[in-house]
Image: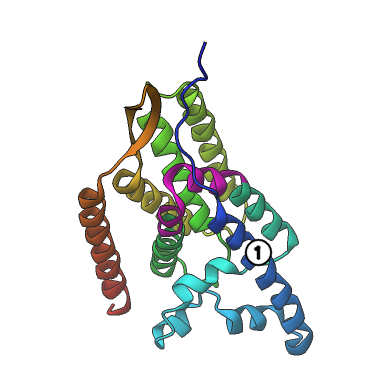
Amino acid sequence: MGNPLTIPKSKPIFTDLTLCILGSMFLLEIILTFKTHDFSKTLIILGAKWNTAINDGEYWRLITYGFLHGNLIHLLLNMIALHVFGREVEMIYGNVRFLIIFLLSILVAGITSYNFSNGIAIGASGGLFGVLGSLMYFFYKEKKEIVGAEMRFKSMYTLLIINIVFGFLIPNIDNSAHFGGLISGAILAFILAPKYEIVSNNNKITIQKYKKQTFEAIGLLLYIAFTFLLFYQTIMK
């Protein structure tokens, strides 16, 4: 009896790199706070999403906020989620596609937060919700093709509902960023989710990713154009 066929997977190098960056930024927050004696001021200096500064042209805050965290528990929860779900998304989607999903979801989450919340926002949760949305889409799409995919989708759907409920029950959680990241991840998953084909070479049967570069390129360009249109409308209000 031969070995079961498995889908090809990438090494999660960008997930591990992102985890290192998140940890390093938190250390920088602690070090800088010893100088400023004001943690809120430290977060603003390092790039928190602050509408007043964004209105003054500091648009980079719509990305940098995603690499800052308010306390050790906040950091650890997001790092654990990224380690679990981010690594899986990167292994399934590939390195560059994971990075696109994570960063664009942070950006869209930042834009929605800017539009619906005037408070200072920090944290990788918007990107993580994008990662979660892309993983849910993949398991839903492959529920009839991959053993256990339907069960994974249902378990992640339950986890998503729990997170949304807690988001409304616990104060100071930016739900608009979460929803923005989730929607972004799902849309990007539709564009970037891998497709597979069974290939036979020299009597060896393997599963390989089906190349769909044209669709991905057009879809990604349209989504980036939409994101920047959303960004432009946001800053021109």
Look at the magenta stretch and give its main secondary structure.
Answer: helix
Element under disc 1 = helix
Asked if residue 133 shows in the view, the reply is yes
Instruction: State the residue in front, 63 or 143.
Output: 143
Q: Is residue 131 magenta?
A: no
Left or right, 6 with reference to 38: left
The amino acid type, in three-letter code, at marker 1 is Cys
In the rendered image, residue 92, in percent from the top left (x then y), is placed at 46, 41
Q: Quadrant of residue 211?
A: top left
Magenta part of the protein: which range? Answer: 84-100
Name which quarter of the figure residue 74 lies in. Answer: bottom right
Vertical placement of 207 versus 177: above or below?
above
Along the line of sight, the residue nearer the viewer: 216 or 152 = 216
Across and down, in percent, residue 140 comes to 39, 31
Tell me the residue at 31%/44% (across/down).
190
> Which residue is at the far front?
202
Q: Quarter-wise, where is residue 58 in the image? A: bottom left
Give coordinates of residue 224: x percent, y percent: 28, 63
Q: How is this picture coloured?
A: rainbow
Residue with the most extreme top position: 1
Q: Closest to the observer: 76 or 99?
A: 99
Q: Is residue 39 left or right of residue 185?
A: right
* Residue at 55% from the left image edge and 51% from the top image edge: 12
Is residue 143 visible in the rendered structure shown here?
Answer: no
Determine whether 99 is above or below 24 in the image.
above
Quadrant holding the C terminus: bottom left
Q: Nearer the viewer, residue 205 or 110?
A: 205
Confirm whether the magenta stretch covers residue 87: yes
Residue 124: % across, % down: 56, 60
On the image, numbered disc 1 is attached to which residue?
A: 20
Residue occupying image coordinates x 49% and y 48%: 90
Count of all numbered marks drawn on residues in the image: 1
